[in-house]
Amino acid sequence: MSDDAHGAYQVLARKYRPQDFSALIGQEAMVRVLRNAFEKDRIHHAYVLTGVRGIGKTTTARIIAKGLNCIGTDGTGGPTVEPCGVCEHCASIMESRHVDVIEMDAASNTGIDDVREVIEAAKYRPAMARYKVFIIDETHMLSKQAFNGLLKTLEEPPEHVKFLFATTEIRKMPVTVLSRCQRFDLRRIDPERLIEHLASICEAESVEIDTEALALIARAAEGSVRDSLSLLDQAIADGGKDAASVRTMLGLADRARVLDLFGLIMKGDAKAAIEELRDQHKSGADPEATLRDLAETTHWLSTLKISPDLANNPALGADTAARGAEMAGTLGMRVLARTWQMLLKALEELSRAPSAIMAAEMTIIRLCAVSDLPTPEELVKKLTDEQAGSAGSSGPAPTPGPGSAPQARLSVASSNAVAAPKPQGMAQTSVAPEQDLSHLPQSFEAVVALISEKKDGELLYDVETGLRLISYTPGRIEFQPATGAREDLSGRLLQALSKWTDHRWIVSVGDAPGGETISEMRSEQMHSLEQRVRKNPLVAAGLELFKDAELLVIPRKRMTSEELGDVPHGEDLDDDEDLFGED
């Protein structure tokens, strides 16, 4: 390995930092736009570079600054996307010592005073370069006042000034700043491309290392070039040349052992899965990394079910790819989706657990516990088959004995009904003899009174105006919705009564015509009552005396549907004190 001028070792991330756009991997779209802008002399005055850490934002900003100020080997060149790298401007910019290229770390210079210095410096022409370039790293760390201070300069900058902003949190930057800049999103580097890049660096450094080991480093770097080079540096220093040593360095379990653990979990063998986890932990695997590996395996198998070609990953190896394809063909998508959700939840709870290994073990125990649960489709099919078999049998369904467990029933909720399946051969209003229903409302009027007592005004109004009762027995209501009734009336009524009475109700919509709604009954009886009041001699005399008077009948109390039903229609009362009282 080479040393610098002072004989000190230079880390790979600095030694192999790109000096021009040709060495910048994975950002072809940005390079194409910049190349066209330079060739057509349409260079913007402000650029925002965003992306994950270590993706090359600051390096790209320096390359742009070099291209803006490069004068070529002969000293006569202009702005270019292919800076020479040898002129005084190119050399000093890459070493961060150019007087006209000012780099500012916004993480430590966040205030308005720091921005005022930038604004003041922007007023003066560059001392020696073509453009005065301001590179502001971690721009999102600037304060609100600092951003506001930049707005005017960004809106109308001097011709000799260019701004280059780099940030990992683009959403924290004000839109007023973003609207004044051209934005470039630097992409994560694909693992395959990153493996090729690491392999070329190993070749340049005369270091032999397995492709699988490089794949592990690329995966751990998560698309960051700088992170991958730092890990490669660490692996070389550790003497790791194979996947096993790199796994130990990274605290990862062997991929084959991860598949072994995943297979044990899917079989529901909690004891063997816990033993495998502990063995991996003793071998140096980090529990959190193991859970992440399980989540990654779940994602990989899920994608294999959609596209089997994804198994052809050279970094996986033939054996691993074959095992993955076999497992993907065996496991259902809903099982994999459930496993994915549980692993994500476990990773969120990891920080609150007493220890990482405890959290990992409890996660595996939970996954094993649900491994044999049927999927919703299997459950519905099983219940449908059981119901079909029960319907096809000639004899009545057997009655559960005193010590037998109750049979599960499937409730179906829709806009038309919320009810459990009606037992075969049983009348609509029948009630199971072993159930004690004495605590339930014994009449529909009592149900209405219960709703009124619970002060659920909205439900009370909907029941009184939208429900035409067909039949009622304690725990079961059958009705026909009135015109304009809400579609969710049956579901809301079922939920409310089940909650208030601690009993599972059946509320269904029937085909038979229902009776009048309570509101219709009340209106009809009030009309009948008004006609009877008009026949009273005193009332009739008053209406005759006052021709324009309007009769308003107000009952002394709110009558229930039962009381309304007792009032005769269109009949005269012999004693008017039933209407007017004793006074």
Image (cartoon, rainbow, N blue to C red):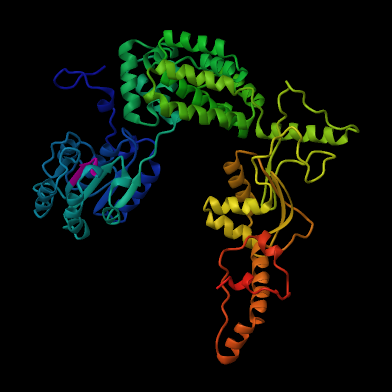
Per the image, is 212 magenta? no
Q: Is residue 578 above or below residue 154?
A: below
Q: Is residue 157 visible?
A: yes
Q: For this rendering, which residue is in front, 379 or 563? A: 563
Q: Position of residue 535 (x, y in %)?
A: 67, 82
Horizontal side, residue 55 vs residue 483: left or right: left
Q: For this rendering, which residue is in front, 104 or 541? A: 541
Magenta residues (range): 134-139
Q: Is residue 247 above or below residue 380?
A: above
Horizontal side, residue 125 vs residue 360: left or right: left
Q: Can you name the residue that lies furthest to the front here?
A: 582
Quadrant of res 4: top left
Q: Residue at x 38, y 17 (%)?
A: 355
Q: Is residue 308 visible?
A: no
Horizontal side, residue 229 vs residue 10: left or right: right
Quadrant of res 252: top left
Q: For this rendering, which residue is in front, 527 or 494? A: 527
Q: Is residue 105 above or below residue 253?
A: below
Q: Is residue 174 above or below residue 56?
A: below
Q: Position of residue 328 (x, y in %)?
A: 62, 26
Q: Can you name the residue that lies furthest to the right here?
A: 394
**Majority secondary structure of magenta residues:** strand
Instruction: Count the labels in the image.
Output: 0
Q: Quadrant of the N terminus?
A: top left
Q: Position of residue 199 (x, y in %)?
A: 40, 22
Q: Residue at x 55, y 87 (%)?
A: 549
Q: Residue at x 70, y 37 (%)?
A: 410
Q: Position of residue 420 (x, y in %)?
A: 71, 41
Q: Quadrant of the C terminus?
A: bottom right
